[in-house]
Amino acid sequence: MANPKNIVSLTGSITGKIRMLSRSDGETFGCLFNLSVKRNYRNHEGVYEDDILPIKYIFPSDSVMSFIKTLSEGDMIQLSGTVRIGTYGKEKGQIHILAESISLDDQCAKKHEDQTSGTVSIAY
């Protein structure tokens, strides 16, 4: 459930490979990836820069995991979630976005519709 004081809404493209997270028994439960989000202003050279944000997503169902597996580098997505800071272990002090919902951006949905025989999966 979203914290009304910590809500993030992002639209950007996936950069690099999506890394699946697995438990010790081999069961996949989530993924990690980076999202490139274009800034809404130009730098001193007149170029729009991107912020690369680390994203963590825990799958609420197997169908969502199947949807995530269809995504690849360069795909435009929209997500909502919260900002998190790791509190222990290797993640202590590291900031990431914990995604709560992910969907295809309209620009990318057509590509996936063609690849999945007319159905577009949306993750909630």
Image (cartoon, rainbow, N blue to C red):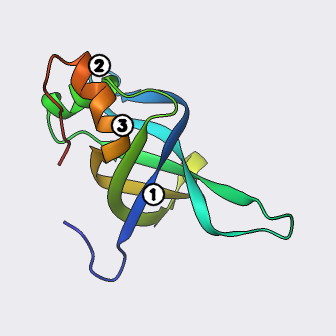
Q: Report crowding for label 2: few under 14, some 14 to 19, many 20 or more residues within 10 A (C-alpha).
A: few
Mark sitting on residue 84: none
User: Is residue 92 something that shows in the picture?
Assistant: no
Residue 68 x %, y %: 31, 31
Residue at 51 percent across and 29 percent down: it is: 73
Q: Are marks 3 and 1 in contact (CB under 8 Å)?
A: no
Q: Amino acid at mark 3?
A: Cys
Mark sitting on residue 108: 3
Quadrant the N terminus occupies: bottom left
Mark sitting on residue 97: 1
Residue 94 x %, y %: 60, 57
Label 2 element class: loop
The Cα–Cα distance between marks 1 and 2, rounded to whole angstroms, is: 26 Å
- Between disc 3 and disc 2, the foreground one is 3
User: Is residue 53 something that shows in the picture?
Assistant: yes
Residue 70 x %, y %: 32, 23
Disc 2 target residue: 25
Residue 25 x %, y %: 29, 19
Q: Earlier in the sequence, mark 3 or mark 2?
A: 2
Q: Earlier in the sequence, mark 3 or mark 1?
A: 1
Q: Amino acid at mark 1?
A: Ile
Along the line of sight, the residue nearer the viewer: 43 or 56: 43
- Between disc 1 and disc 2, the foreground one is 1
